[in-house]
């Protein structure tokens, strides 16, 4: 875990670093004295303690640029100006520490932040996976457990569900990576949810609802192994 402290006062950086190391002894703790210096680092922090009032680039602008670069980890603002808390909401700050910070409060917030970080990094269960897509003018969040199968047709990906079909522009390979171990790509144009398989042979898979999908010859052996592993997982989960 990489914890970064950014404060223009070197004394504050040093004090916070020692306290953070006591609370999180196995963490790598790095300090910076400006937002500009922090943004030059190629490695993003897992947890950032960021002062708001700094000369040059302030903490709000630094955090905004980090978010725009795709950083989605834990942000904790540190400041002597309590009224700035409302400015932090759009940046999805985890917490707001007001100086002077007590040891008890720092420990409480860091422990909570580490717990949240562990939750963020835990892979989602297959039942919790979803995809956010734009179909026409609609934005749709679809839980993947509801997906029977996906196919590529005319440069679009079509998601087949019991409630109907959803078309969007997106790559099947990206969906395959997201979908998890309950899905198998039986053909370059088809990704199947093994939960809904009713029967199969060397040429076709038939799903709930009656749709039959071709299996590419080269994919049959891999599909068979994946389906047997899927069935075994479900049997073991029932036994548990």
Image (cartoon, grey):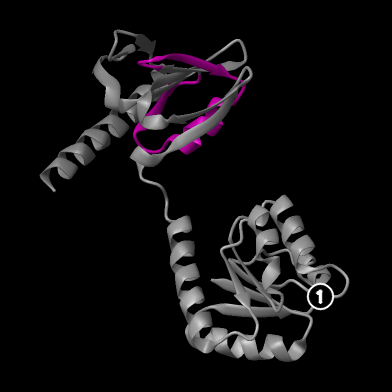
Residue 179 vs residue 84, the one in the foreground: 84
Which stretch did the figure color magenta?
Answer: 161-188
Residue 15 vs residue 216, the one in the foreground: 15
- Image coordinates of residue 175 in percent, x first then y, are 51, 31
> Residue at label 1?
54
Taking the spot 36% from the left edge, 38% from the top edge, the residue there is 181
Whether 190 is drawn above or below 44: the answer is: above
Residue 123 vs residue 10, the one in the foreground: 10
Left or right relative to 57: residue 109: left
Left or right relative to 121: residue 133: right
- Image coordinates of residue 50 in percent, x first then y, are 69, 72
How crowded pointer 1 is (Cα within 10 Å; few <14, some 14-19, many 20+) is rated as: some
- Image coordinates of residue 108 in percent, x first then y, are 46, 78
Q: Residue furthest front?
A: 83
Q: Is residue 50 magenta?
A: no
Left or right relative to 106: residue 235: left
Whether 84 is drawn above or below 107: the answer is: above
Taking the spot 43% from the left edge, 35% from the top edge, the residue there is 179
Whether 109 is drawn above or below 166: the answer is: below
- Image coordinates of residue 162 in percent, x first then y, are 35, 16
Q: Residue furthest right?
A: 56
Residue 83 vs residue 91, the one in the foreground: 83
Element class at badge 1: loop
Whether residue 24 is visible, yes or no, is no
Quadrant of the image occupied by residue 142:
top left
Taking the spot 15% from the left edge, 38% from the top edge, the residue there is 235
Taking the spot 66% from the left edge, 79% from the top edge, the residue there is 30
Q: How many marks?
A: 1
Q: Residue furthest left?
A: 239
Whether residue 138 is visible, yes or no, is yes
Left or right relative to 56: residue 157: left
């Amino acid at each position: 875990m990489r914890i970064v402290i950014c404060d223009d006062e070197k004394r504050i950086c040093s004090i916070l670093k020692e306290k953070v190391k006591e609370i999180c002894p196995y963490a790598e703790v790095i300090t910076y004295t400006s937002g500009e210096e922090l943004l030059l680092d190629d490695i993003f922090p897992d947890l950032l303690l960021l002062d708001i009032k700094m000369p040059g680039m302030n903490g709000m602008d630094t955090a905004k640029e980090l978010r725009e670069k795709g950083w989605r980890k834990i942000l904790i603002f540190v400041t002597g100006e309590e009224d700035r808390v409302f400015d932090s909401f759009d940046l999805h700050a985890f917490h707001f520490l007001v100086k002077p910070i007590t040891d008890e409060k720092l420990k409480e917030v860091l422990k909570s932040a580490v717990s949240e970080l562990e939750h963020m990094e835990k892979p989602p269960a297959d039942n919790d996976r979803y995809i956010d897509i734009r179909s026409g003018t609609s934005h749709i969040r679809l839980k993947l457990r509801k997906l029977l199968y996906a196919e590529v047709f005319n440069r679009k990906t079509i998601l087949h569900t019991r409630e109907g079909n959803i078309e969007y522009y997106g790559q099947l390979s990206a969906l395959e990576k997201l979908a998890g171990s309950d899905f198998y790509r039986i053909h370059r144009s088809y990704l199947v949810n093994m939960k809904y398989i009713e029967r199969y042979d060397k040429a076709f898979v038939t799903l709930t609802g009656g749709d039959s999908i071709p299996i590419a010859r080269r994919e049959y052996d891999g599909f068979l192994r994946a389906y047997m592993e899927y069935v075994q997982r479900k049997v073991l989960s029932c036994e548990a």
